[in-house]
Amino acid sequence: MEIRSGHIIKGNAIGHHRIITNDDKPVLSQLYKLGGAKEEILSKIVKEYLKLGIIHPSESAWRSLIIVVPKKNGEHRLCIDYRRLNDATIKDAYPMPRVEKFINALEGATHFTKLGTESGYHLINMTPIDIEKTVFACRERLFEFVKMLLDWLMGQLHFIGR
């Protein structure tokens, strides 16, 4: 699913993503105070995510920090600070592919294509037992992701097909 306004990529979910933590103690982060304009932007993003089925309301004991970051094109991106969750996540030993391998494969090529994979993450469902770990707060309400988000530590390995 494409999350930018007005663009939705149709597609079926491609598996489930797990967040395996070293204990069941919830990560509960304090909230950042957002200014009025950023609160409105966040509200718009949350409404869009709800409409697209990327998030739904939550009652989880987990909570990570959230900020809204401007992008070069004038749009805004929802960023969630999952550092504390990532610290509690058991790491997969599978090595990430080395970028040099891909660069060397391009030697002699004359045509290139740029593909954005940001929204491809939203084609991967969260494993139901781990959805509660993905919570963020917005205007006194909690929401949790049912689709994978770019910011998770082991998400990249899952996305590349590990």
Image (spheres, rainbow, N blue to C red):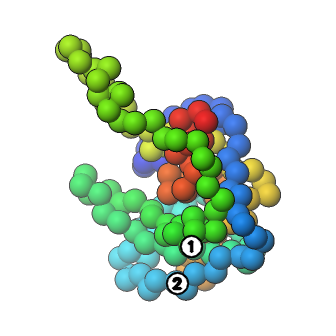
Image point (66%, 59%), residue name:
90
Asked if residue 65 lies left or right of residue 23, the reply is: left
Residue 8 visible in the picture: no
Badge 1, how many Cα within 10 Å: few under 14, some, many 20+? some
The numbered disc on residue 48 is none
Between the C-alphas of marks 1 and 2, the distance is: 13 Å
What residue is shown with label 2?
31
Image point (38%, 74%), residue name:
38
Which image quarter: residue 15?
A: top right
Residue 84 visible in the picture: yes
- In the displayed structure, 29 sits above or below 99; it is below
- Of 113 and 154, nearer the camera is 154
- In the displayed structure, 27 sits above or below 152; it is below
Of the image marks 1 and 2, the number of the one nearer the N terminus: 2
Measured as percent of width and height from the top left, residue 91 is found at 61, 55
- Of 10 and 132, nearer the camera is 132
Q: Amino acid at mark 2?
A: Leu
Q: Amino acid at mark 1?
A: Arg
The numbered disc on residue 84 is 1
